[in-house]
Image (cartoon, rainbow, N blue to C red):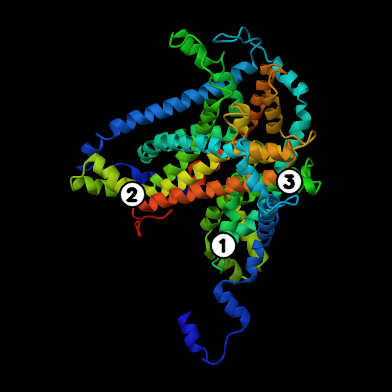
Amino acid sequence: MSTATSTSPRTTPAPSPGDGKSRLRPSFTKLMTIGVLGFFLVMLAGVVGSVLLSSIATRWLNTWLPEGYTLSWFSSAWQEFGLTQVLLVTLQVAISVLVITLIIAIPAAYVLARQDFPAKRLLTVLFLLPIVVPTITYGVPLATLLYRLQLAQTLPGIILINLVPSVPFAILILMPFVEQVDESLEKAARIFGARNWQVFARVVLPLLAPGIIATSILLLVRTIAMFDLTFLVAGPTTQTLVVKLFYAVSAAGFRSPQSIDAMAVIYMATNVLLLAVAFKFINPSRIVGGGAH
Amino acid sequence: MATRTAAAPPSALPPLNKRLAEQGVTPRLLLLLPAVVFALGLFVYPFLYGLGLSFTTDGGSLWSNYREFFSDPYLRGTIWLTVRLAVPAVLIILVAATPLALAMRGAGRGKQTITVILLFPITIGTVLLSDGLLDFLGAAGWVNRFLLDTGLIDQPLQLIHNYWGVMFAIIITDFPFVFLLLLSYASGIDPAYERAAAVFGASARQRFLRVTLPLFAPGLATTASLAFVLAFGTFPSALLVGEPAGSTRTMGVAAYSEAFQQFDYPMASTVAMLMAGVELLVIVIILGLRSRLVPTLSSGRKG
């Protein structure tokens, strides 16, 4: 964790003869930077702002701002879309995926980070492949298989299909954390007579706790936001929040847009809350970059 | 290691488990078992199952599903419709994100804030984004309101339920991902090289083209491949803000509708396999371009 900030001192610009010259180039780069970021921020603020404002609007037609404001859409959306049931399904799926993923990924990440063995590259590629292949490509055959096995539209089916991208994702995030655990501590424990499982359970796991917490939160966010795969196998009673939102948006016109937007806000709030907690534990640029530094 | 083998009598071969342990094959590898079972059962087997399904026929030849795909213009056309969305989207994102990532690598606190802002769209996901785009870019949305009020247009622009809606959705969802990846690659390029080039009199343009870009090329190629795969798999936004029966009928939409609306599972798997094939092809092209344009530096950098 402490290494997360260690790159900043190196990159502070040292005064050098070339500095005056190099400041000329950023004038173009700076304009470009401001332009790109500005466009992006306007789009993002517009999209999120529209949804937020619409969810508390009484009526909003062809004007800059709504006619009046109300919070009643939230309770009506909750009723209309049966969100108690939907959230319950979402929670069951997310937590089951989390637990199973950790059980599979922690030992695998540990061995991959610690040990060299024949066919290690092959195995690593195999484990990480589902991240690189788009979900629909393997999702359609897998969903077909789940339908044939009568597992589709059930909770186990949804959990199984969600594991496919979750396990590689967890292995990828956990590996750098394992590398940060000092191996000499494990050796010391062995010298004092600890067995393999004891070393794992009493030395490695506690030292890995920050990594496991970070991974868990990111996994929860990912599973809650995972649309493509869940959508392929979700049945009428097993829709997660994001799938419910999709059906509501795609059938727009049948319901008031404010009610749909209220559900969208509930969904957004869940994810933002989880992500805010995640930021307490991790530096996100390290996760996405896969530890390239 | 060397001293131990020297001390042992040359004739006595060490026991098998010891020889295996020297190769790294220890009981600890059993910890990989759950992950191997998982990968084979939930990824490799379903994929092979899909591959087999794409070759199943009702009496025709082995390739009949593929032949049907390529002879039906509605199906065949999805390849072009998907490429037509994904390639421009990736190019736009790369052109926008590269200077940004290079400029941002030194920034300390600002970098953190921007990272947080950029991560936000990844978190909200495509479905919510599409819902927001329908409001924001719709005929009564803020964008059209602004353009109408400033007198730039007389009629609201059609920005959703067509190609452009999906293009906006792809750019907003994939830009943060590309930017953060590029940023981590850019942070790995030591600014000392550029300073050294500047000392030797290289102009800003020369420094960028001859120093920074070659160092950046491997990261750029990897990112481009990943971004293309992401954009190529565009699915929910093509249904929600696109025109899924027409201009944005991507291969993802076709695979989905073949399977779960037409119940033609073999054809759905065929589309999925072709999707994988096209992606592989584009990745090979990108990596080929990279090695052709920029000679690989053997001792370049890690990452």
Q: Amino acid at mark 1?
A: Leu
Determine the chain carrying the residue at label 1: A
Marking on residue B286: none
Front position among marks 1 and 3: 3
Identify the residue at horizontal 54%, vertical 20% (top origin).
B137
Residue picked out by circle 3: A144
Q: Dot 2 lies on which element?
A: helix
In depth, the one of A161 and B262 nearer the eye is: B262
- Which residue appears at 34% of the width and 44% of the height? A11
Residue B294 pos. (x, y %): 34, 51
Contact? badges 2 and 1 (CB < 8 Å): no
The residue carrying mark 1 is A122
Q: Amino acid at mark 2?
A: Pro
Sort mark 2 into few (<14), some (14-19) or many (20+) by Cα contacts within 10 Å.
Answer: some
Residue B208 occupies quadrant: top left
Q: Position of residue B50 (x, y in %)?
A: 68, 51
Q: Earlier in the sequence, mark 1 or mark 3?
A: 1
Q: Which residue is mark 2?
A: B214
Q: CA distance from mark 1 to mark 3?
A: 27 Å
Instruction: Answer few, some or many: residues within 10 Å of disc 3's Cα (few below 14, many 20 plus, some between 14 and 19).
Output: many
Q: Chain of mark 3?
A: A
